[in-house]
Image (cartoon, helix red, strand yellow):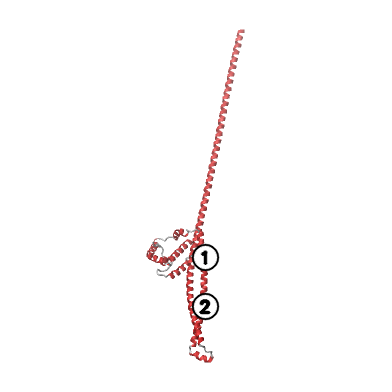
């Protein structure tokens, strides 16, 4: 099943639908320099999202098979993009949030290893490119010397073929050149011409290799940028996770502290209630003892009162009897 595209990649790369691969690469290099996230002064997330769209558009349109599939869907995609533009303007943060899990599905150490691999590959390519350029410069220098020798030979041949050179030979009295000398000169010229063609062919091959190496280095640099963005996103996500974890730990500590304080308050309240109950019980016991003591005192006072009353009554009865007996004795005596 063919993939479904939703972006106008030709508009993203600012090219026409008939643009060649070379023009696509040139436009991508220009836009990659302009839209690099490191140059964003304010909205880093928006710049990252736009740069990722640029990378994806470049990867699709530079691949002949993917571009053919995309061109079949282009009219539908273009109409959909126009409809979306007229209806609403979706903030780029939403796109970033959708692409976030895919970009951060690896851990930061894995991205670091991939970055080191890319940097190693780039260093190797840079070293190879330097050597190829050095060899190409050497070939250009050799070609320059050979071209000068060929040009000088052609000028000498042209000069020797003129009639003025014929008359000048009588004046200067130059040594006439033998057939062997002429054959050697022509042989050297043929050798120089062959060497010139060989070196020109080698130089073209070197230039092709240099162009391919430069393209490879640009692709590696693009991958390095993407990996560094992923490392940044992974580190940001890790830091956010650690911050959330620290917040959760702080909230748990606060909750545990609140629970401890609540238990302490409940313990103090129970202790105070127990002390109040004990004080109330002690007061009740004291009142009870006081009531019992008062009751005993009242009973003792009542007993003493009754005893005194009985004594008084008995004493009064005794005195009455004594008085009666005394009266009776007086009567008897009288």
Q: Position of residue 280 (x, y in %)?
A: 55, 35
Mark 2 and mark 1 in contact? Answer it, CB < 8 Å. no
Circle 2 crowding by C-alpha within 10 Å: few under 14, some 14–19, many from 20:
some
Q: Position of residue 98 (x, y in %)?
A: 44, 59
Q: Is 163 in front, or is 70?
A: 163
The N terminus appears in which quarter of the rendering?
bottom left
Q: Position of residue 139 (x, y in %)?
A: 51, 76
Q: Is 64 in front, or is 235?
A: 64
Q: How many marks?
A: 2
Q: Earlier in the sequence, mark 2 or mark 1?
A: 1
Q: CA distance from mark 2 to mark 1?
A: 33 Å
Q: Is 22 in front, or is 173?
A: 173
- Residue 282 lies left or right of residue 84; in this view the side is right
User: Which numbered tag is attached to residue 50?
Assistant: none
Where 81 sits versus 248, above or below? below
Mark 1 residue element: helix
Residue 334 seen in render: no
The C terminus appears in which quarter of the rendering?
top right
Residue 194 seen in render: yes
Residue drawn at x 50%, y 90% is: 166
Mark 2 residue element: helix
Where 256 sits versus 75, above or below? above
Circle 1 crowding by C-alpha within 10 Å: few under 14, some 14–19, many from 20:
few
User: Which numbered tag is attached to residue 142?
Assistant: 2
* Residue assigned mark 1: 120
Where 307 sits versus 100, above or below? above
Q: Is 17 in front, or is 310?
A: 17
Residue drawn at x 52%, y 78% is: 142
Q: Position of residue 143 (x, y in %)?
A: 50, 78
């Amino acid at each position: 099943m063919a993939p479904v595209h939703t972006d106008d990649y030709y508009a993203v790369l600012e090219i026409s639908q008939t643009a060649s691969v070379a023009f696509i690469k040139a436009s991508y290099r220009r836009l990659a320099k302009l839209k690099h996230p490191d140059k964003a002064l304010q909205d880093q997330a928006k710049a990252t999202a736009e740069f990722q769209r640029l990378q994806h558009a470049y990867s699709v349109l530079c691949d002949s098979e993917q571009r053919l599939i995309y061109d079949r869907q282009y009219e539908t995609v273009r109409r959909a993009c126009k409809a979306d533009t007229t209806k609403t303007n979706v903030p780029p943060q939403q796109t970033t949030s959708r692409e976030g899990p895919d970009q951060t599905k690896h851990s930061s150490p894995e991205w670091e290893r991939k970055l080191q691999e890319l940097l190693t590959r780039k260093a190797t390519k840079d070293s190879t490119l330097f050597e190829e350029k050095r060899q190409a410069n050497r070939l250009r220098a050799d070609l320059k010397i050979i071209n000068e020798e060929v040009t000088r030979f052609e000028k000498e041949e042209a000069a020797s073929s003129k009639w003025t050179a014929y008359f000048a030979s009588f004046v200067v009295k130059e040594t006439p050149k033998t057939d062997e000398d002429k054959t050697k000169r022509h042989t050297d010229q043929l050798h120089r011409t062959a060497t010139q063609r060989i070196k020109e062919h080698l130089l073209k091959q070197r230039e092709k290799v240099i162009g391919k190496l430069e393209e490879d280095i640009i692709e590696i640099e693009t991958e390095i940028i993407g990996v560094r963005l992923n490392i940044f996103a992974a580190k940001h996500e890790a830091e956010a996770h650690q911050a959330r974890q620290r917040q959760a730990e702080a909230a748990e500590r606060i909750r545990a502290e609140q629970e401890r304080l609540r238990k302490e308050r409940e313990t103090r309240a129970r202790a105070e209630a127990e002390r109040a109950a004990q004080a109330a019980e002690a007061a009740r016991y004291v009142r009870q003892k006081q009531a019992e003591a008062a009751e005993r005192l009242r009973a003792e006072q009542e007993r003493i009162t009754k005893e005194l009353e009985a004594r008084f009554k008995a004493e009064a009865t005794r005195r009455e009897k004594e008085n009666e007996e005394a009266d009776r004795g007086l009567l008897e005596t009288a």
